[in-house]
Image (cartoon, helix red, strand yellow):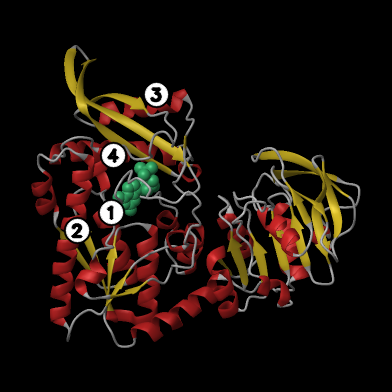
């Protein structure tokens, strides 16, 4: 295991990713909790992340001194380099500004981190975070690379196995960065890299069995990858002690219900309760137009329906269902380091079943809480999940409700479902589905005039959205070519009754959000 101490860099998660790609398990902890985590986890190596602070600040965050005394290898990145240098007796001086940027460094000496990657005298592109720099080496260290702004860009103490660099090896803009991290993991820390999805699967199954014992588990399925993979894994561990509940709120994509039922009942033979609650949901949503009110209504009803089903299932067996399974992922679990403080504004209240465990007195089973999204996909494949399911775009809990701005009606939802299906079909046929993070149609609450054949039409407008993203936090609109968009508009207008105009959304996030509500 490798422990990553987070000083608040935007890209700390990428360090964990790179380490895991080397087949070594890694965990991130905020610097405030690093000492306790270090003692408990007993990692084989430690990585110090970058961060926005300056080591020259009065209350500058630092790494626990214990890690430097424990005899484990340490790699410092950017802020991590500066705090390591300073804590070990070197000098750090203020730079003028702090920003990400491309830089070229020159290798001035051989170093185990560069083995097979860089040679002495070579120059290489790296992604640098300008700011403070080390001006005097701590005892025992030598400089092994220099950058235009600083003669000491990479430092090494081979005896103690301490290494540090001023640039970010974890980002793709440092083309050789992954190889440098590999050298740290393999050659410096001597870790073999035997952490695989197969091993994870077996460990996870043991853990689920130990946690659940003879108890009953209920899993809410959304049709998404995370809850599906969680359910399949849990079923493998405890068989029919698991019951899955799939709530159809009437705002799902075309054929969604059928897809989920086929997969679980027929492909995997996992007990599944399919609840058609569309009347209830659409009834209560009638007349509701405010986006937050829609989200809250759906969240509340979802909990009601789910709870009622859970009670029914419990009544069939002896006693209650004791556990609720959720597909929580690692990014939801990592505590972020915040330097700004203060409450953040709610942009959108995200809907999940978070309110349930407390209300129902259930314990949580979260077998994916150590994984990143793409690792869940790998695990899904490992568990035999069909490729078309593994690679699906994310779909929000409130479903088509938030893609139908204004009031929701069955008629509008039906139109939207058809338009969305045509759009996705076009994307798949063009071979673009896997290049896009998320694509969907939106039904605007306005009608416009058109002409078809000899007649006048007065129908709805469909908006098309497609974005690229790595985590949904920021996104760029996808640059389709005009021919694709034109052909898609024609197909939608010809095939979907009730639509006579199609527009494409070219807003990135920020300032837009991915969904329209
Ligand atoms: P926004 O619209 O906030 O969306 O840019 C970011 C990502 O989150 C998804 N999303 C949701 N997912 N429940 C979910 O499970 C929700 O209430 C919800 N709202 C947005 C959205 O589809 C995108 O992937």
Q: Residues within 10 Å of mark 2 (few under 14, many from 20)?
A: many
Label 2 and label 3: CA atoms lie apart by 38 Å
Question: Is disc 4 placed on a helix, strand or loop?
Answer: loop
Which of labels 3 and 1 is toward the front? 1
* Badge 1 density bin: few <14, some 14–19, many ≥20, Cα 10 Å: some
Instruction: Check if mark 2's residue and mark 1's residue have beta carbons within 8 Å.
Output: yes
Judge left or right: residue 149 versus residue 345.
right
- Label ID, residue 191: none
- Give the CA separation, mark 2 to mark 4: 19 Å
| First-in-chain label (2 vs 3) | 2
Task: Please give left or right for residue 368 compared with residue 20 in the image.
Answer: left
Above or below, 430 relative to 79: above
State the separation of the CA atoms marked 1 and 4: 13 Å
Residue position marked by numbered label 2 in the rendering: 302
Identify which residue is drawn at 31% across, 51% down. Answer: 350
315 left or right of 116?
left
Residue 1 at x, y percent in the picture:
62, 74
Is the C-beta of the residue carrying label 1 under 8 Å from the nearest atom of ligand 1? Answer: yes
Looking at marks 2 and 1 on the same chain, the residue that comes earlier in the sequence is marked by 2
Residue 517 badge: 4
**Residue 206 point in image, percent of width and height:** 45, 83
**Dot 3, crowdedness within 10 Å: few (<14), some or many (≥20)?**
few
């Amino acid at each position: 295991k490798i422990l990553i101490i987070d000083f608040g860099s935007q890209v700390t998660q990428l360090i964990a990713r790179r380490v895991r790609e080397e087949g070594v398990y890694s965990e991130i902890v905020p610097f405030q909790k690093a000492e306790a985590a270090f003692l408990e986890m007993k990692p084989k190596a430690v990585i110090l992340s970058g961060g926005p602070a300056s080591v020259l600040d009065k209350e500058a965050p630092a790494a626990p001194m214990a890690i430097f005394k424990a005899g484990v290898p340490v790699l410092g990145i950017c802020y991590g380099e500066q705090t390591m240098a300073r804590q070990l007796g070197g000098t750090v001086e203020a730079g003028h500004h702090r920003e990400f940027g491309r830089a070229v460094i020159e290798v001035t000496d051989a170093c185990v981190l560069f083995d097979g990657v860089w040679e002495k005298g070579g120059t290489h592109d790296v992604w640098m975070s300008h700011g403070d720099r080390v001006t005097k080496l701590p005892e025992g260290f030598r400089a092994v690379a220099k950058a235009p702004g600083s003669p000491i860009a990479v430092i090494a103490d081979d005896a103690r196995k301490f290494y540090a660099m001023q640039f970010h090896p974890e980002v793709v803009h440092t083309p050789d960065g992954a190889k440098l991290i590999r050298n740290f993991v393999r050659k410096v820390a001597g870790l073999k890299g035997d952490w695989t999805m197969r091993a994870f699967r077996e460990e996870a199954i043991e853990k689920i069995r130990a946690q659940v014992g003879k108890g009953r588990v209920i899993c809410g399925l959304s049709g998404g990858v995370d809850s599906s993979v969680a359910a399949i894994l849990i079923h493998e561990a405890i068989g029919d002690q698991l019951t899955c509940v799939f709530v159809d709120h009437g705002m799902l994509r075309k054929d969604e219900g059928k897809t989920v039922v086929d997969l679980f009942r027929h492909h995997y033979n996992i007990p599944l309760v399919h609840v058609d609650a569309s009347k209830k949901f659409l009834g209560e949503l009638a007349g509701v137009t405010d986006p937050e009110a829609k989200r809250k209504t759906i969240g509340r009803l979802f909990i009601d329906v789910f709870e009622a089903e859970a009670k029914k299932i419990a009544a069939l067996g002896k006693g209650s269902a004791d556990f609720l399974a959720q597909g929580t992922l690692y990014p939801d679990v990592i505590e972020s380091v915040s330097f700004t403080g203060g409450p953040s504004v709610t942009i959108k209240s995200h809907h999940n079943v978070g309110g349930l465990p407390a209300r129902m007195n259930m314990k949580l089973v979260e077998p994916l809480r150590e994984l990143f999204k793409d690792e869940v996909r790998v695990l899904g494949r490992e568990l035999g999940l069909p490729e078309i399911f593994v690679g699906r775009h994310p779909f929000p809990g409130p479903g088509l409700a938030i893609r139908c701005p204004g009031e929701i009606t069955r008629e509008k939802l039906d139109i939207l479902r058809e338009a969305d299906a045509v759009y996705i079909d076009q994307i798949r046929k063009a071979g673009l589905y896997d290049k896009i993070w998320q694509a969907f149609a939106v039904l605007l609450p306005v009608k416009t005039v058109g002409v078809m054949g000899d007649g006048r039409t007065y129908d709805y407008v469909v908006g098309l959205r497609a974005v690229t993203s790595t985590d949904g936090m920021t996104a760029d609109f996808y640059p389709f070519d005009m021919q694709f968009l034109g052909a898609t508009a024609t197909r939608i207008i010809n095939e979907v009754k009730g639509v006579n105009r199609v527009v494409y959304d070219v807003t990135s996030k920020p300032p837009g959000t991915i969904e329209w509500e």
